[in-house]
Image: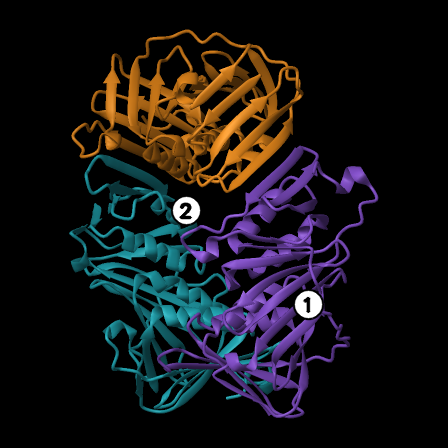
Chain colours: A cyan, B orange, C purple
C-alpha cells in the first residue's frame, strides 16, 4: 500500500512539466526515504534525477519499496487537471497495475480521482558518485533560461566558460556570434538574484544547446539554478524543489574535434 | 423597419462567440417580445436557443415580425470590430436584404457601420415544451468549463451523475479513468460560487464530450450555469444573459448500448 | 570607427519589429547627422524611411559616412536578445565586414556582445521632396492599428476620406461593407488621445489594406500617428520616435480604374 499526500500539489505538476519533454516513460521509485526517478532522455544523451524526500509529504506511507512505470505524457495530462492550489495524493494498492492521483481543492468542495495504468519499463539505476567540480555557478534560474533561449536563436552549441570574474556563455551560427557575460554579484537585495561563482579551476566546456534549453523547463520549480562543471565530468544542472528535494540534469560535454563548429570565440 | 439599440453591446459579441462554432447559418427572429434564435448545430445533434427580451434594449422598434438569415461566422467578424464598451444598434429596412450593425464608442467620437448581406435559410421552429427535470444543478460556469476541458483530455464521453450529496462527472479513455465530484455547497461568500443541487430523483446520463465542451464557449456570458437532467429528455445547459434573456443548449443523452465505451465507472 | 550608444535600447528593438516584415535587407546609413535607413519593401510598393538623430544617442561617434548592409531578420534575432531596459551600443571598425551589438543590463551585471556579418546591398537613395498635403490627420496610433486590423477582416482595400468633420475609413468585401468615422476631437484629457484634422482640401484615396496593416507594426514606437494625404502623392504614415527621429512609411494610392473593386461606398 502506497499513499503519498502532497499539500503543495503544484510542485508535482511542475516536476512533470520539467521532465515530460525529455523523457517519455520512466519508473518512479518509492521507498521509505522518498519518491524518486532516474531516467535517460529518449536519445540516451542526458540523464534526469528527481528526488522528493518523504519528509516533504504531509502523509507518506510506503509499506515496501516499489517501482512504478509511468508514461510521463499521460501522467502530465492527468496532473494538468489538478488546480494549482490542490492537494495531490498518489495512491497504489499492493500488486495493482494502476496508480490513482487524487486532487482535493482547498475548500474540499471538489474531489477528483484519476486512475492511470502502470507500465513495465526496463531500467537500470546508475550510481552517480559524488564528485568535486572545478567550478560551480549559482545564478537566477530565469536568467539562465533567458540566456539559453536567446543563444539558441543564433547557434546549436553553447560554450560555458568560468573565471573568477564571471561566467561566459558563447555560441556561433550562420548569422554571427554571441557572447553573454554574467559577473559574479553577491551584493543584491534578494539572495535569489545573486550570481555566485565558486571556482577551484577555470573551466570551459561545450554543450548541445537543445538539451540545455530543455533543462530550463524546470525553471518554475526554483528561483535559482546551480551549474556544476568539470572537464572530466557531465555538467550537473540542479533545481532545488522547495525544502524537499531536487531535479538534477546531467549532460556530457561535447568533445571539440572540430574547432570551427564547436568552439565559438572564447 | 427594425431598430434595436443595445447599450451593453459586448453581450451581443459574447453571444456570437458562444454559438458561432456550433452553428454556421441561422435565422434571427425578431418580434415585439424580443430577439431570438433557434438552431440545430451543423451535425443536427445539439440545439441552441437564444432569447434577448425587448425590455433589455434601450430602444426596441420592430414594426412586424421578421426572420433574418445570417452567416454567424461573418456576423462574428463584424461584431469583433465593435469595442467592448460600444453601443451596438442593429438596423434593417423593410424588405431589405441587408442588416446594418452600428457601433458607437462611449465618447461618440467613433461611429462605425457594418452592412451584411442576409441569407435565405430554411428552418423549422421546434416547440420545446416546459418539462420537469429529475435533477437540476446550478454551479459556477468557469468550474463547469474547467471540468469539461479537463475530462476531454482523457475521454470522449462524460457521465453526469447527480445524488443529494453532489454531482459527479466521469470519463474513461485509453490512458485511464477520471471522476470529478462537486459537493453541494450553498454557504459561500459569493452566491455565484455556490453549487446547488435540486434533486427530485438521482440521475446518471452519458453525453458526447465535444458538445459539452462547445457549450462552455458561453461561459463569458454568465458566472453561473444551470444543468437540467432527466433520463427521458435532452439535457439543458443554460447561461442567463444579464437581466435580458438566456442561451440554452439541448443535447440528447447517449444510449448506453456498449457498456465499455459509454459507461465509465459510476 | 563607429560607436553609437543608445540608453533607451528598446527603441532600436521596436524599430526592427516595425520594419523587418516589410523589408528583408537594407543599408543603414551613418553620418554625423544620425543613423538612418531608406528602403523599398520586398515587392517594391511601399517605402520606409527611418531617422535616429545623433543627438538622441548618449554617445555618437561616426568618423566617416558609412553604409552598412544588414539582413533585418537576423538583426532582429540579435536585438531580441537585449533586455527591454538594456543599453544598446552599435559598433563597427573601419573596413570591417561585421557590426557588433553590445547590450548592457541596467545593473551592469550582464554584458552581451553579438557580432553580425554585413552584406553588400545595392540601393538607390531616393530624394523625397517636402510637400504640401491636402489633408493631415493626427490620431492615436492604437486606434489606427485597430481600424486597419478590423477592416482587413472585411476587405482588401481601404478608402481614407477626410472632411472638416472627420476622417472615414471604408472597405468592401464579399461579406459586406464597413465604414468607420472618427470625429475631430481636440478636447481630450490626454493630448495623445486627440484626433486632429488639418484640412486644406477634402481628399479621398484608396490604399492596399495589407500595407497599411504592416505599417501599424510601428505602433509601439509612438502613441500617435500622422497620416498625410494628397491626391497626387503617396500617403505618408509617420510615427515619431521619442525626441530623436521618426519612421515614415510611403504608399502610393490605388488608381480607381475598377469602381467595384477599389471604391467602397464613400
Q: SS at mark 1?
A: loop
Q: Is residue A157 above or below residue B39?
A: below
Label 1 crowding class (10 Å Cα cut-off): few <14, some 14-19, many 20+?
some
Identify the residue position indicated by label 1 in the image: C24
Residue plotted at (58% across, 69% down): C246
Label 2 crowding class (10 Å Cα cut-off): few <14, some 14-19, many 20+?
many
Q: Which mark is residue B76?
A: none
Q: SS at mark 2?
A: helix
Q: Is residue A137 above or below residue B77?
A: below
Q: CA distance from mark 1 to mark 2?
A: 43 Å
Q: Residue B195 lies in what quarter of the image?
A: top left
Return the x and y of residue C4 as percentages of the image width and height: 54, 84
Q: Is residue B253 visible?
A: no
Q: Which mark is residue A74?
A: 2
Q: Which quarter shows the C terminus of chain B? A: top left
Q: Is residue C59 above or below residue C8?
A: below
Q: Nearer the viewer, residue C1 or B134?
A: C1
Return the x and y of residue A42 as percentages of the image width and height: 48, 61
Amino acid at each position: 500500500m502506497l499513499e503519498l499526500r502532497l499539500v503543495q500539489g503544484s510542485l508535482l505538476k511542475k516536476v512533470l512539466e520539467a521532465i515530460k519533454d525529455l523523457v517519455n516513460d520512466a519508473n518512479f521509485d518509492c521507498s521509505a526515504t522518498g519518491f524518486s526517478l532516474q531516467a535517460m532522455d529518449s536519445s540516451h544523451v542526458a540523464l534526469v534525477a528527481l528526488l522528493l524526500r518523504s519528509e516533504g509529504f504531509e502523509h507518506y506511507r510506503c509499506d515496501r519499496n516499489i517501482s512504478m512505470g509511468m508514461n510521463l505524457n499521460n501522467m502530465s495530462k492527468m496532473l494538468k487537471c489538478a488546480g494549482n492550489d490542490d492537494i495531490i495524493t498518489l495512491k497504489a494498492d499492493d500488486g495493482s497495475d494502476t496508480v490513482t492521483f487524487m486532487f482535493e481543492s482547498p475548500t474540499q468542495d471538489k474531489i477528483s480521482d484519476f486512475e492511470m495504468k502502470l507500465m513495465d519499463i526496463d531500467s537500470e539505476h546508475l550510481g552517480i558518485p559524488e564528485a568535486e567540480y572545478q567550478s560551480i555557478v549559482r545564478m537566477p534560474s530565469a536568467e539562465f533560461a533567458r540566456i539559453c533561449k536567446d543563444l539558441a536563436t543564433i547557434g546549436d552549441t553553447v560554450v560555458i566558460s568560468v573565471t573568477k570574474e564571471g561566467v561566459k556563455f558563447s555560441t556561433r551560427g550562420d548569422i554571427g556570434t554571441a557572447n553573454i557575460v554574467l559577473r559574479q554579484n553577491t551584493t543584491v537585495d534578494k539572495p535569489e538574484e545573486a550570481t555566485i561563482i565558486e571556482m577551484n579551476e577555470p573551466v570551459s566546456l561545450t554543450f548541445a544547446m537543445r538539451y540545455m534549453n530543455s533543462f530550463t523547463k524546470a525553471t518554475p520549480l526554483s528561483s535559482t539554478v546551480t551549474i556544476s562543471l568539470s572537464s572530466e565530468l557531465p555538467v550537473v544542472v540542479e533545481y532545488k524543489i522547495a525544502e524537499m528535494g531536487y531535479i538534477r540534469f546531467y549532460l556530457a560535454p561535447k568533445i571539440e574535434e572540430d574547432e570551427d563548429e564547436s568552439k565559438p570565440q572564447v
